[in-house]
Image (cartoon, rainbow, N blue to C red):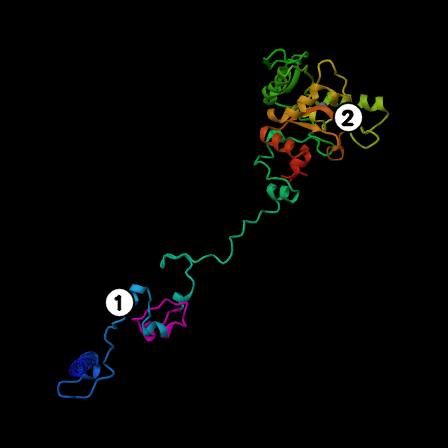
Amino acid sequence: MTAKRILRIIAGVLVLAIFCVYTYARSYVSPKTRDLGPAGGTFDFQGWQAPAAPLDPLLERLGIHIPPPEQLLRSEDAETSVQPTAAPTAQPEKTPEETAPAETGEESGEQPAPAEETPEPTLDPNSPAARAAALGLPAPPEIDVNSWEFMLANGDHSIGEYAPEQLAYLNQTADEMDIQYGFNPNRCPVDSRIAQPLLDFARGCRDAGLPVYLSSGYRDYGTQAANFTRICQNNGVTDGKDSNGHYITMPAGCSEHQTALCCDITDRYYEIKNSSIEQTETFQWLVEHCWEYGFIHRFPSGKEDVTGVMYEPWHFRYVGNEAAEYITRNGLVLEEFLALYGVE
Ligand SMILES: [Zn+2]
């Protein structure tokens, strides 16, 4: 019985001790006791700030962030950056210049994102590129359409009695590589400016193992006039056209041969100029490779209504490398090409 009483006393002392410790600890953190003025004045509730919460270190360790009251109050203004230390009234009202979007971004250093993509520059509808685009063609090369390579002679464009300044005379079978400038009736005359490209073209065909013959180059106005009369008489016509309305011979001043920028090229052993020439390997090589030398197949089949001239698989015309490549790749004739540059 004595031992039990002793235990009760000890238990009672422990409870009393715990109570005392609890009371002391509570009074230590209580604002009522800590912040009371020394003279027992009133507690300053407005000036009082909560002590650092004992839970802060624990919350920090757990990665839990409780925003300060200022942020909670402003959270509805989600699009503006939170500036807890600045009262809303402390910010000066922005002037119209400041609120207007910066045009250059020089002052702010921020370039405002464009509202729309920059529109592509609109083409001048009268530009060659716009005319080509309207036809579904790629942009044509930048050329001087008034340059000599683009001289146009056809039923609608007479060049009158034009004659080239300088002729050159080529060996007709391309056996000889020299270019002569003195008259030679046994050679093929062309404008001296296309002599080298034409010789290269013919040599290219020869080097492919094919017979080549420069059948006809420059013809002057008088010669063309005589040809026109003779061919018309032979075919019983007066306008130089076949029954389809396509020229079989051109009036003087309208023949491309008078420009001296073209040449009739045939198989050396196959000089009769009719459509069967297309079956020769020589023609097939010439029509495939002409653009590599600055030449085009001038009067192709299917374009007679555009050129006004019957199909002539033997007639090749120099226009320069850029134009020849564009014309050939896009299946055009010279009239269609020049129309891109406004030549009607
Ligand atoms: Zn011809």
Residue reaching furthest to the left = 39
State whether residue 119 appears in this view.
yes
Q: Between 289 and 150, which is closer to the camera in this rendering?
A: 289
Name the amino acid, label 1: Pro
Name which residue lies at 51% across and 52% down. 118
Q: In the rendered structure, which segment of residues is drawn in magenta?
A: 73-95
The reply, left or right, for residue 183 in relation to residue 113 is right
Q: Which label is found at residue 79? A: none
Disc 2 packing (10 Å; few <14; some 14–19; many ≥20)? many
The reply, left or right, for residue 188 in relation to residue 28 is right
The reply, left or right, for residue 218 in relation to residue 110 is right
Residue under label 1, please give it. 57
Name which residue lies at 66% across and 38% down. 339
Tell me where residue 250 sits by quadrant. top right
Residue 127 location, x and y as percent?
Answer: 60, 43
Q: Between 30 and 205, which is closer to the camera in this rendering?
A: 30
